[in-house]
Amino acid sequence: MQASDIKKVLSIGSGTIAQFIVTQCALFGCEVVIYAFSEDEIGAAQKAIKERVLQSIIDANMTTEAYAKETMGRMRYILTKEEIPADIDLVTESVYEDPAIKKAVWSEFAPYLPKTAVLTTNTSTMLPSLFAEASGAPERFLSWHFAANTFFRNLVDVMPHPGTDPRYTRLMADFSRRIGLNPVVIEKEVGSYLANTMLASLIVAAMKLLSGGYASATEIDRSWMGVQKVASGPFGIMDSIGLNTMLLTLKPLLNETELAPLQALVDGGHLGIKTGQGFYTYPDPAFKRPGFLTDAKPVGM
Amino acid sequence: MQASDIKKVLSIGSGTIAQFIVTQCALFGCEVVIYAFSEDEIGAAQKAIKERVLQSIIDANMTTEAYAKETMGRMRYILTKEEIPADIDLVTESVYEDPAIKKAVWSEFAPYLPKTAVLTTNTSTMLPSLFAEASGAPERFLSWHFAANTFFRNLVDVMPHPGTDPRYTRLMADFSRRIGLNPVVIEKEVGSYLANTMLASLIVAAMKLLSGGYASATEIDRSWMGVQKVASGPFGIMDSIGLNTMLLTLKPLLNETELAPLQALVDGGHLGIKTGQGFYTYPDPAFKRPGFLTDAKPVGM
């Protein structure tokens, strides 16, 4: 199978990330079949794909109303496994991020999936080897992972487990490029992929600096933003991810003292942007104010 | 003393970073006295300040030829400690990055320094407490640290040691702002300041991913660059810093296996950009080529 042979895609799940994935595939010519778990989910997905996902691409002048409509014409929804077409080339699964649920879903779907399709999970934190056997075809199974709006943040992880046939890893890298994405090809499975593994390490260092009393969150962010020329530092990033999520991520990596400033915020109900308060106060956090970092200005003229 | 009271600056040392520091002070109206260790050093510094430092600012249309000339008029050079003026307000030291040399220099200069001047070291890796006693005035002594061209990369670290009077920390933050810099104020001394401490942690994570066989340097960089929207990933950054320097920095942080890919490059004489070969091949490294990361493109129009 070549990338151009992937013409029909099945999405197991119709939530936020699934909506981005199926839209990306359909924009680039694939037929997509979306398995939803209820009629309500179908309605919600149709509405979100039309009004949010496709509209954001139209608003950015990256496609037309007419092409968006044509793209939606390549999507259909099913509610039973019996409706899964026999000619599916690629399966992408984005169900709830719980190992037991994902394993159960793959076991239930396995008998209904075509014997030649590439089978992919969109897990963001777990190893694909956890579900490889349940998929019924470990050699055709791997992770194909998206973070957010795939059209604009068009990076995708392609991560095999030890039993994946390397042909399918290459195939998913090629297919990703075919549909406008930048694949990052991983050779050996790793829990949080590459960028998030490195980001966790950066944040661990930032938390040690803060909890050790070396500097405030603001100064730590100013330093990182100023040197790396980026729009947020580690504490701004944590506020955007959500401090409850960050606490779970960092618990295995830091001790109680090192976690204390984060724990105190979470205990106080301050979870970051979504609650209006985290390491910064929103909607007008200090690190986004003019003068937080000033550019060089002309002098003597 | 207030920031506006700092009118006369002494630089101990006239090397690359000292040239940037004295130019920054002189551009914003300070008189600067530059202590050099030989006549040759004076000639080299005069030439570099005129032809490289000030010229780069003129070339960027950030100052005029006339103002650059006026700025040079505020600089003078001395070769003996006896010539140090009695009304110096700020001392900045940028001698060779060796603890014994820095300590000796501070001890030798201490008797010649005014009893009210702020005393600062530009060490990039060492704690100011190492030289505080040698300076003769620990309460007026702290780190004031620049990375490179101060005019365009206008971030500066202000880092006290436990014996620094907090008034001088605030004063140096204020003075930094007065001369067009963004101060990062550190509360407790830390070996590599904030950004470099975090960068080391990021690079440690990247080296573990590479040495563990999880992904290639290219894919690790692609992932970081794509998510963080930056121009280089950890391996591109290492190539620009120099792989021999990186090896010294990382030796206390990684084991032999984790260091192996870096050690192999250094053993082969491949030190990064400066030798034309590191994790990438220069002057045309893969991560700077078009298509390494593609932006979203219009579709269906």
Image (cartoon, coloured by chain):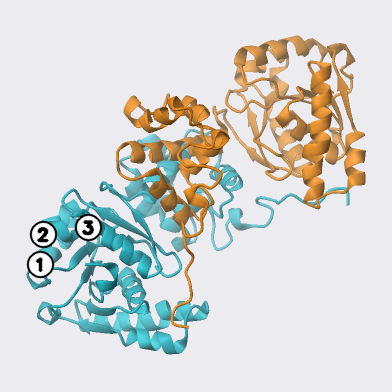
Chain colours: A orange, B cyan
Q: Earlier in the sequence, mark 3 or mark 1?
A: 1
Give the letter of the chain under mark 3.
B
Residue pointed to by mark 3: B167
Residue A273 as seen in the image, left or right of residue A159:
left
Task: Tell me what residue is drawn at x 69 percent, y 53 percent.
Answer: B291
The x, y position of residue A254, in whole percent, is 38, 28
Q: Is residue A3 visible?
A: no
**Residue B112 on image: x %, y %:** 9, 73
Residue assigned mark 1: B110
As drawn, is A142 to the left or to the right of A191? right
Give the mark nearest the N terminus, 1 or 2. Answer: 1
Q: Which residue is mark 2?
A: B134
**Quadrant of the rendered image containing residue B216:** top right
User: In the picture provided, is A166 more to the left or to the right than A55?
Assistant: left
Of the numbered discs 2 and 3, the one sitting upstream in the chain is 2
Q: Amino acid at mark 1?
A: Ala
What residue is at 14 percent from the left and 57 percent from the top? B139
